[in-house]
Amino acid sequence: MIVLGIVLIWNGRRVIDDLGVPKGKIVYSDSHAQGNKTSPFFSKKLEIVGKPDYVLLDGGMYFPVELKSSYRPSSGAYFSHKMQVAAYCHLIEEKYGVRPKYGIIKYLNGIYKVHYSKGLERCLVDTVQDMRNNMLAVQLRRSHNNSKRCLSCSFLEKCGDSLTG
């Protein structure tokens, strides 16, 4: 079991190095692809749960790394990806007691650094509240024009504005 843990950490470090992500000790890895089960992070304050792909520790600072299978948009990063990383920063702060300064999104064609500012944290809190309000809504309006997103949406039954026909 110890040997398996060492191999997974080494493999994770190799993956991080190959991606060009900043150095740091891997303290958490959502390594479900290798068959290991990792516990998610939980926030009592926001009542959210999440599993970042990696959490690195460098110079006393923890930061999340999220790997994406899409290309980085010309605008820098998708809003939903920024919110995902902001949520991971919040979860890390609650778990380790140290506020991350940033998180990393690794796209196929580059890296985007998400600065975890107080403004971004407020946006996260507002977004979580909006999501909760939407869950209680009788009918929802879609926020996109992508039928593939509709097919995998957990709100599909409530939407009434689906592109799936």
Image (spheres, rainbow, N blue to C red):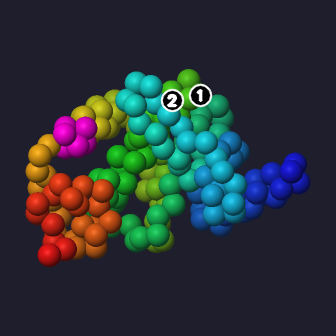
Q: Measured from the top left, where is residue 40 in percent x and y?
A: 55, 42
Position of residue 38 in the picture relative to residue 119 (left or right): right
Residue hosting label 2: 93
Q: Measured from the top left, where is residue 102 in percent x and y?
A: 47, 41
Q: Measured from the top left, where is residue 132 in percent x and y?
A: 25, 38
The quadrant of the rendering that contains the C terminus is bottom left
Q: Measured from the top left, where is residue 38 in percent x and y?
A: 64, 47
The structure residue drawn at horizontal position 30% and vertical position 56%, both measured from the top left corner, is: 154
| Magenta extent | 130-136
Position of residue 60 in the picture relative to residue 112 (left or right): right
Q: CA distance from mark 2 to mark 1?
A: 5 Å
Residue 70 in sight in this render: yes
- Circle 2 SS class: helix
The structure residue drawn at horizontal position 60% and vertical position 65%, both measured from the top left corner, is: 19
The structure residue drawn at horizontal position 40% and vertical position 24%, both measured from the top left corner, is: 45
Front-most of residues 87 and 161: 161
- Circle 1 SS class: helix
Disc number at residue 50? none
Q: Is residue 127 above or below residue 96?
A: below
Disc 2 marks a residue whose amino acid type is Glu
Marks 1 and 2: in contact by CB < 8 Å?
A: yes
Disc number at residue 96? 1
Let me know if residue 41 is in the magenta part.
no
Position of residue 67 in the picture relative to residue 46 (left or right): right
